[in-house]
Image: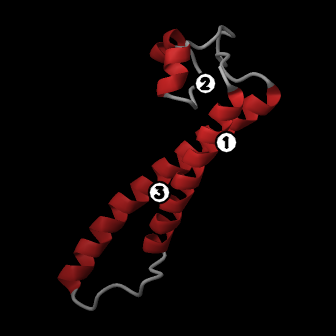
Amino acid sequence: MDLSSVERELRAARAGLEARLARAHDHLTRSDGPLAQDFAEQAVERENDEVVQALHDRLAADIAALDTALQRIAQGTYGVCTVCGEEIAAGRLKAMPAAAKCTACAERG
């Protein structure tokens, strides 16, 4: 496994997620202006806020997972299950480059 290319991919994915997180943050902080004056329109905007907040939280969690994977690369532990210490299958890492657990440990929870 070429860790330098994995690291590049993780950093590129992180940059993309950061851009999406910034847009979600801008929406939630109303950087484009206050809520509409119409009460019905405000209700729709607030419902949208709930969806955007959930997206924001998911993006933040995904960025944290990528950061952890980058730390594991730096520490020389990337590709090793954080639960059992066994090697994580290359196919799993290819599908989920930030995977911290082998398939068996991930299935156990």
Residue 71 placed where, x, y %?
74, 35
Under mark 1, the amino acid is Asp
Residue 83 placed where, x, y %?
64, 15
Residue 53 placed where, x, y %?
42, 60
Q: Are marks 3 and 2 in contact (CB under 8 Å)?
A: no
Residue 107 placed where, x, y %?
45, 14
Name the residue furthest right.
75
Q: Tag 2's secondary structure?
A: loop
Cα distance in 3D space between marks 3 and 2: 22 Å
In the rendered structure, find residue 6 and report the number of the disc placed on it. none
Q: Is residue 97 visible?
A: yes
Count residues near mark 1 (Cα–Cα under 10 Å), then give few for <14, some for 14-19, many for 20+: some
Q: Is residue 15 above or below residue 77?
A: below
Looking at the picture, tell me which residue is in the foreground, 109 or 33: 33
- Closer to the chain start, of discs 1 and 3, is 3
| Residue at which label 3 appears | 56
